[in-house]
Image (cartoon, helix red, strand yellow):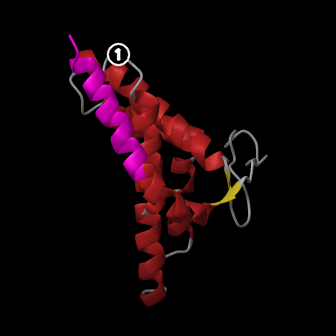
Amino acid sequence: MADLFTHACVAVIARLPQANHRWVATFVAGSCLPDVARVPSMVLTRLRWDLPQIPEWSCYVWAPLHLPIGIALESYCVSLFFPEAQRRTAFANLALGGALHLAVDLLQTHFGMGYLLFFPFSEWDFEFGWMGSEATVLIVPWLLPLTGLAAWLRWRNTRKP
C-alpha cells in the first residue's frame, strides 16, 4: 500500500508545475494503474492456497500489465471510457503516468528478476537497485506532507492576481 501512495505522490509532484491541471487525476491514475493491475494476481495467489485446482499460470498471466507493453494496453483500454474527443489526451496522461510509475520502480531492487522492459521481444531485465522495494514504507511519511505542501504552494501561487 505504501508503494501506491509513493506513486501517487510522485505523480502529483511531477504534474504540479504544468499550467493545465485538468488532467492531473488521470495522470495520477495512470501512475497507480500498474499496481492496481496486480490485484487479480494477488487474489488468485491467495485463493490458490485454499483451492489448489486453480492453475498456477493464472497467477502469473497478469505480470505483463506491470511492464511497458501492459501499461500501454491498460492506458488504451481505460482511455476508451473517456468521451471520444478526449481519448488521445486521456491515453497520453495515463501512459505517461504509467511511465513515471515504471521509472520509480526501476530505482528499486527486487528479489529475482528486474523489469523486462522490452517484453515480449527480449528477456533482458533491468533495474537500478538503489533502494529496496520495502523502502517506500519509510518514504511515505515524508512524501505525503511534502506532496500536500507542494500542492498548497501551487494553489496559493495560482490564486495571486
Q: Is residue 66 left or right of residue 148?
A: right
Mark count? 1
> Quick check: 141 above or below 82?
below
Which amino acid type is marked by label 1? Ala
At x 73%, y 65%, the residue is 112
> Quick check: 152 above or below 55?
above
Q: Main secondary structure of the magenta part?
A: helix
* Nearer the observer, 51 or 133: 133
* Nearer the observer, 124 or 108: 108
At x 36%, y 40%, the residue is 149
Q: Residue furthest front?
A: 160
> Is residue 76 found inside the magenta-colored segment of the image?
no
Q: Residue furthest right?
A: 124
For disc 1, the marked residue is 19
Badge 1 element: loop
Q: Percent from the top left, x then y, of residue 127?
A: 73, 49
Q: Percent from the top left, x then y, of residue 160?
A: 23, 16
Residue 74: tell me if it is visible: no
Span colored in magenta: 144-161
Q: Is residue 105 left or right of residue 37?
A: right
> Quick check: 128 above or below 30?
below
Residue 156: tell me if it is visible: yes
Q: Percent from the top left, x then y, of residue 74?
A: 42, 40
* Residue 84 in which image quadrant: top left
* Residue 155 in which image quadrant: top left
Which quarter shows the N terminus?
bottom left
* Residue 13 in which image quadrant: top left
